[in-house]
Image (cartoon, rainbow, N blue to C red):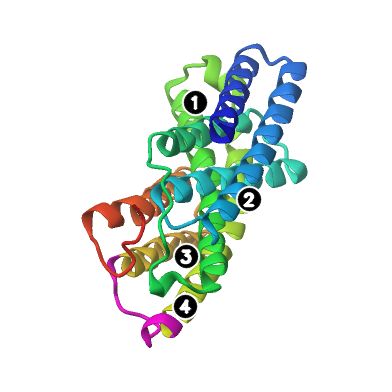
Amino acid sequence: MLFTATYIIYSVAVILYLVYFSSQNKQVRLAARRILTSAGLCHLGLLILRYVEAGHTPLTTHHDTVSFFALSMTGAFLAFRWRYKVKNFGTFVSVVILALMTVALFSSRNLYPLPPALQSSWLLVHASIAILANGFLALGFCGGVMYLIQDHELKKKRFTLFYHRLPSLESLDQLTQHCLSIGLPLLTLGIITGSLWAKQAWGSYWHWDPKETWSLITWFLYAGLLHQRLAIGWRGKRSAIMSVIGFLAVLFTLWGVNFLLPGVHTYVR
């Protein structure tokens, strides 16, 4: 029931953000942000109840992983919004959050006993850091999509609803940089804690398991993007495209590997 209530509150927030995108009414924007915050708090309460019910960190099933991904993205956005103001960013972010919640909605919510390898305090540390990193990288994805839309509007000289509602290309490029500067260090820390956990569980820091391999591929994509931005001065469209590609790698690492390339990390049901 709490999950359903949380999903409904997220849905209301998305509707209000879409109304604001169209009307640009500041009161609607304020209401949307408050409702999104309420949804995040309900979501946090849901996660705590799942922890109590399961008796361990609820990040080992497909439902819980996607649900926590949505919560991480909500928290990342609210933290980001507290410091930076990017016009209509909340509209795009809330849509992605609701999409994640929809995936969680149709996933099995059953709880299962932990396999021996997962019975460790590293579960909370590694999984939470890795998924929180995904939350910030998801914000970068939203910024990249917004950049590509605005860039397309300018090149085609089609000054439509999107052109008047989206921020400047410079603002969106800075947004991508801010998200990358937080998401990549968290992703790095997630890989390091995962290696330490692997040493404890299997006696070796690295096994070239499919999920480990794709985590490393994802890291190289984002590290390469940061390097190109700092060393060569990559800006604009190329950076936005790389942010989108990097996030697709995040999604494949999170979901695709579990279903297509099973390995020692295949615990999520």
Q: Can residue 63 be seen in this view?
A: yes
Q: Which residue is drawn at 70% across and 35% down?
A: 37
Query: Which quarter of the rendered picture does the N terminus lie within?
Result: top right
Q: Mark 1 points at which residue?
A: 154
Name the secondary structure under disc 2. Answer: helix
Identity, as a three-letter code, of the amino acid under mark 3: Ala
Q: Which residue is drawn at 41% across and 46% down?
A: 110
Q: Name the residue under label 2.
A: 48
Left or right for 79, reference 53: right
Q: Which is nearer the N-term, disc 1 or disc 4?
A: 1
Q: Which is nearer the N-term, disc 3 or disc 2?
A: 2
Structural crowding at the residue carrying mark 2, measured as other residues with C-alpha within 10 Å and reported as few (<14), some (14–19) or many (≥20): some
Left or right for 31, reference 262: right
Q: Main secondary structure of the magenta part?
A: loop
Structural crowding at the residue carrying mark 1, measured as other residues with C-alpha within 10 Å and reported as few (<14), some (14–19) or many (≥20): some
4 and 3 marks in contact (CB < 8 Å): no
Identity, as a three-letter code, of the amino acid under mark 1: Leu
